[in-house]
Amino acid sequence: MNDGSILLVEDTKADELLTIRSLKKISVANQVDVVRDGQAAIDYLLDETEDGSGYLRELPSLVILDLKLPKLDGHEVLQQIRAHERTKLMPVVILTSSDVEKDITKSYKLGVNSFVSKPVNIDEFTRAVKDVGLYWLIINKGSNNGRS
């Protein structure tokens, strides 16, 4: 299993708790860090040390990103992630309540790895998060995601 952290970008507390609980149900031991707005996500990923010699934290193994966020929306966050050398290969899964075709299309054009609509039913939501976790943290084999 990939042992890096997971960055959950989610402004709704209930969805945050359900996502974390769903990941634990499949024995994902990865630390889950949560930020509540788009700017906080960019800061988490790209904040440099005071002396400019590196970054404050390692990149997560996976970013789970909502679209509807304060400050910067999910598409703006995704665009900045893909534009930066450090984060451009990092796996990003959009997990959102939107199932609007233009949101899906725009997400893939901006380079998202996967787009998952949040089911309304709690059991289906749990199953969707479990599937995301299983695939991206256990099954999928890729680069080190540019981690540094």
Image: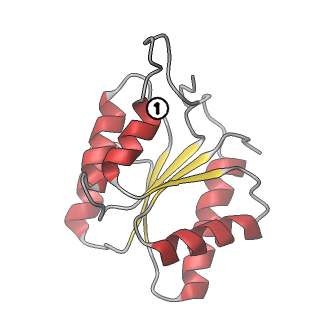
Residue visible at 51% across and 89% down in the picture: 121
Q: Residue furthest front?
A: 50
Local SS, label 1: loop
Q: State which quarter of the image contains the C terminus.
A: top right
Q: Position of residue 71 (x, y in %)?
A: 24, 54
35 in relation to 54, above or below: below
Q: In which quarter of the image is residue 99?
A: bottom left
Residue 114 position in % (x across, y down):
45, 54
Q: In the current view of this chain or complex, which residue is farthest to the left?
A: 102
Instruction: Tell me if residue 51 comes above or below residue 13 in the rendering.
Output: above
Q: Residue at x 33, y 51 (%)?
A: 38
Question: With 117 as the anchor, is 16 left or right in this view?
Answer: right
Q: Can you say whether 12 is above or below 32 in the image?
A: below
Q: Nearer the viewer, residue 60 or 144?
A: 60
Tell me the amino acid under the disc marked 1: Leu
Rendered position, 66 above or below 128:
above
The residue indicated by pointer 1 is 89
- Find the residue positioned furthest to the bottom: 121
